[in-house]
Every structure is written in structure tokens, then in C-alpha cells.
Image (cartoon, grey):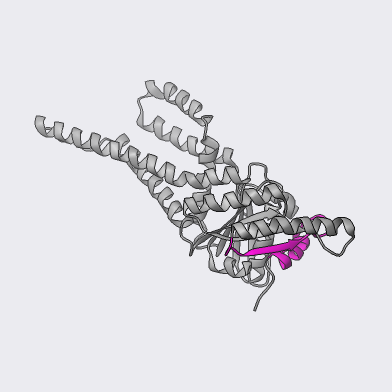
Amino acid sequence: MLLAIARSRRILFVGGKGGVGKTSVSAALAVARARDGGRVLLVSTDPAHNLGHIWDRELADEPVRVLTTDDGWVDALEIDPQATIDRHFAAVGATMRRLLPERLHASAQQHLDQARSAPGSHESAVLERVAELVSSSQESHDLVIFDTAPSGHTLRLLALPEQLGSWTATLLASRDRSDRFAAAAQGIVGVKDEEPTADAELRRTLVARRDRFAHMRSAVTDASQTSFVVVTVAERLPVAESVDVVDQLAALGIDPAAIIVNRRSPADEGALLAARREQEEQHLARLRSALAGLPVVEVPLLPGDLAGADALRILADHVAPPSA
């Protein structure tokens, strides 16, 4: 069932409460789709990156090939917000130095230094990189899987495209009003100047930013392109948080495709695990009742450390087994 979802989508977000195995499940989904012939880009947006540990590889902000199958592959990267912030402010600083008089360079640089550490800069940088990857992967990859940070952080991130898009649109509207007033004033005095270079570049930057966020918002709210897979374990708090996550995804217009219940206890391996399994059944009954109609996939508790390609292939057999 999950393999069918991975085949039919271009973007999958995998999220849930911290500690439930989101990274392992994300990697297993990537393996399953690659074995099915897909070209997969696997991206970690979590500041506490574990994706490299799962693959037993060093990962950075650019894709690294971590798995090759007969017909597909997996490229993986860990988003580095600081690198994104540095690139952004370097570009802005170069533009400001080119357009502003030299006497204003020092004060402009001071403003940029303060903005670099402003609240929200980390989230904005992650979102910028996510938007870049969604756009740049269209030709090179069939599926992008985002291994996300714990639920609250991810939901704030997914709400940002609309918020930042609206803010940018407001700035553009303000620029339009200012331009109209300037044009009217020039008409009165009989002078018509070309649009200043700085204003033209500002407008191009704002338009590009608005369009980038609009594309991102359109992609993540299109259920034919994008879905969210919620990972949980059969315990009281993760189940409650998963129900909340599904409700908030619906409010954001994002399709929740399935619930993966990870690390299910066996019923036939002693009294302790059998009792735990019985308790888990009660929590899952509440989950199914609250999210009726949403597919639930159960993944068993597996032995050993889930690290390296061989272990991820085994997990993939349980998360998204091959189908005809």
C-alpha cells in the first residue's frame, strides 16, 4: 500500500513525534521505491540530523548517492540551514554593495548582521532550501522524501509558504502603490525617469520569492503530488499527537496518506511482550477510531541496529513490501 503511494506521488513528508523512528521509516520508503525502479531524493530537515547515521555515511547539504539498485537509486542530503543563510546573505550583501552608495555600506552590513540572527531565520532558511529542492529535483528524481523534524516544528514549517507568500505579496502591493504615486508625480512635473536599477532589482527579487513560495504552497497542497505519512508507536502520547497532527494537516490543506505504527511488540515472545502487545492494541483501537478511513500500516519490532543499507532493506520489506 505504501509503495503504491510512493509510486503515485512526487513528494512525501514523513513526520511524527520525536523518537518514533521517522528517519528509519523515511529511509526504508526510499529503499522500497528505489528497488521499484524509482529515482529518490531523501532529505533530512531535522536540525538534529540522524540520516547520515542511518546510512552509516557522511552526508552534507548536497546530494550523495547512498544506494543503487538495478533500476533506481537513492540520493540523500541533510539540509544545513546555516549554509543556506550564508548563501542568502552573501547574495543580498553583494547586491546592496553594488546598488548603494559607498557611504551606506557599513550601516547596510550592520543591518544584515542583525537580520542573520533574527528569530525565524532558521525556519525561513530551511523552507528556502526545501523549495529549491522541490523545484530542482523535478527532472532528476521521481520522488522526494522529506524526513522531518518532530511534529510541531514541521507543522510550523509547512504553514510558512502561505505566510511568507502573503507577506511578500503585501510588500509588492506596497511597491505598486508607491510606483503609481511616483508616476503620477512625474506626470505632473513633466518628467519621466526610467525605473531605478535598485527598484527594478528589488521588484525582481520579491516577484521571484513570491512565485517560489506560491509554487511550494501549490505543490504541498496538491494531493496528487504530495502526501504526509505520519509515523507513531502504539503508546498513549504518540497516538494522541498523531491524531492532532492529522487534524492540523487537514487544516493546512495537506493530504495525510497513511499512519505507520512502528516497533510493534510481538505477541508470542514471552509474557512481558505479550502484555505490552495487549496494551498497544488498546491504543491502536483509539487511533483507528479517531482516524477512521486512514490506512494504518504496522511495522514489527526488529532486532539489531537499523543502520546501513542491508538493515534498511529488511525494514523496507515490512514498511513497503514489493508488490506486483
* Residue 216 drawn at (x, y percent): 46, 52
Tell me which corner region of the image, top left, top right, bottom left or bottom right, holds residue 299: bottom right
Viewer-closest of 186 and 7: 7
Tell me which corner region of the image, top left, top right, bottom left or bottom right, holds residue 192: top left
Viewer-closest of 259 and 56: 259
Q: Classify 142 as above or below 305.
A: below
- Count all numbered tags in the image, as a single digit: 0
For image coordinates 69% across by 70% down, the residue present is 321
* Residue 268 drawn at (x, y percent): 86, 65
| Residue 50 visible within the image | no
Question: Farthest residue in the bottom direction?
Answer: 324
Quarter of the image for the C terminus: give it: bottom right
With 126 as the anchor, is 274 left or right in this view?
right
Viewer-closest of 74 and 315: 315
With 45 as the anchor, is 167 left or right in this view?
left
With 98 as the anchor, is 21 left or right in this view?
right
For image coordinates 67% across by 42% down, the residue present is 48
Viewer-closest of 272 and 110: 272
Q: Classify 37 as above or below 298.
A: below
Magenta stretch: give its range: 292-319
* Residue 137 drawn at (x, y percent): 52, 58
Quarter of the image for the N terminus: give it: bottom right
- Asked whether residue 295 is drawn in magenta, I would say yes
| Residue 18 visible within the image | yes
- Asked whether residue 269 is drawn in magenta, I would say no
With 257 as the anchor, is 277 left or right in this view?
right
Tell me which corner region of the image, top left, top right, bottom left or bottom right, holds residue 274: bottom right
For image coordinates 79% across by 59% down, the residue present is 278
* Residue 250 drawn at (x, y percent): 50, 54
Q: Classify 293 as above or below 93.
A: below
